[in-house]
Image: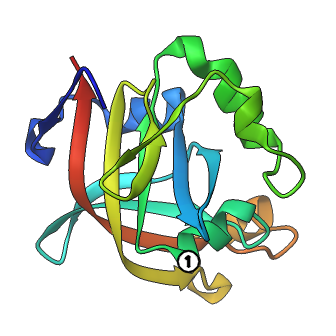
Amino acid sequence: MSNFREIKPEDLNESAFKLIGHDWMLITAEKENKINTMTASWGNFGIMWGKNVVSIVLRPQRFTKEFIDASSTFSLTFFDKSYKKDLSYLGTVSGRNEDKLSKTNLTVTYIDTTPAFEESKLTIICKKLYAQELDPQCFIEKNIDKQFYPEKDYHTLYIAEVEKILIRE
């Protein structure tokens, strides 16, 4: 990726609340030489097991979940606001039904063997460490289950180690 430099996780000066909740991110992985991505606005950054980690959640019906499950790594990419239309499209159309990437202004690139996007302002390469389906019996705040899971399609939680962070210069 041209015009990018690698930084240490502790040198990332962006708010996770803004990046994930406001700007959104693409979660991207490869399976059998095919790439799929989806827009997400839920997740977090932190420390777990003595490692810098990210957490993402994917519902079982999301096509991207198959790609995440099949790969040991994935990327999280963040963009400036000029790409919001592309992110909105990628979050509402399934890659099962069409080549949705071809209908965006994004260019796939690879960081080592993990797919990402040349146009991103920030790319995080992640290595999966843990996956578990959310258990409805574990909700302490019971209205979360009713509000967010009326179809009982519980997310799978993935915790992944941050292997590399690249920011646009």
Q: Is residue 49 left or right of residue 103?
A: left
Quadrant occupied by the N terminus = top left
Q: Is residue 141 left or right of residue 154?
A: left
Residue 99 seen in render: yes
Q: Secondary structure at mark 1?
A: helix
Q: How is the image coloured?
A: rainbow
Q: Position of residue 37 (x, y in %)?
A: 62, 49
Vertical position of residue 13 compared to residue 44: above or below: above
Vertical position of residue 5 compared to residue 123: above or below: above
| Residue behind mark 1 | 70
Q: Position of residue 148 (x, y in %)?
A: 74, 60
Q: Position of residue 11 (x, y in %)?
A: 9, 36
Q: Residue at x 63, y 88 (%)?
A: 137
Q: 31 and 168: which one is in front? A: 31
Amino acid type for the residue under numbered disc 1 = Ala
For this orientation, the residue located farthest to the top is 82
Q: 55 and 135: which one is in front? A: 55
Q: Residue at x 84, y 58 (%)?
A: 96
Q: Is residue 110 left or right of residue 37?
A: left
Vertical position of residue 78 compared to residue 137: above or below: above
**How many numbered tags mark residues here?**
1
Where residue 134 sits, quadrant-wise, is bottom right
Quadrant occupied by the C terminus = top left
Q: Residues within 10 Å of mark 1 (few under 14, many from 20)?
A: few
For this orientation, the residue located farthest to the front is 33
Q: Residue at x 41, y 74 (%)?
A: 72
Residue 140 seen in render: no
Q: Residue at x 43, y 29 (%)?
A: 118
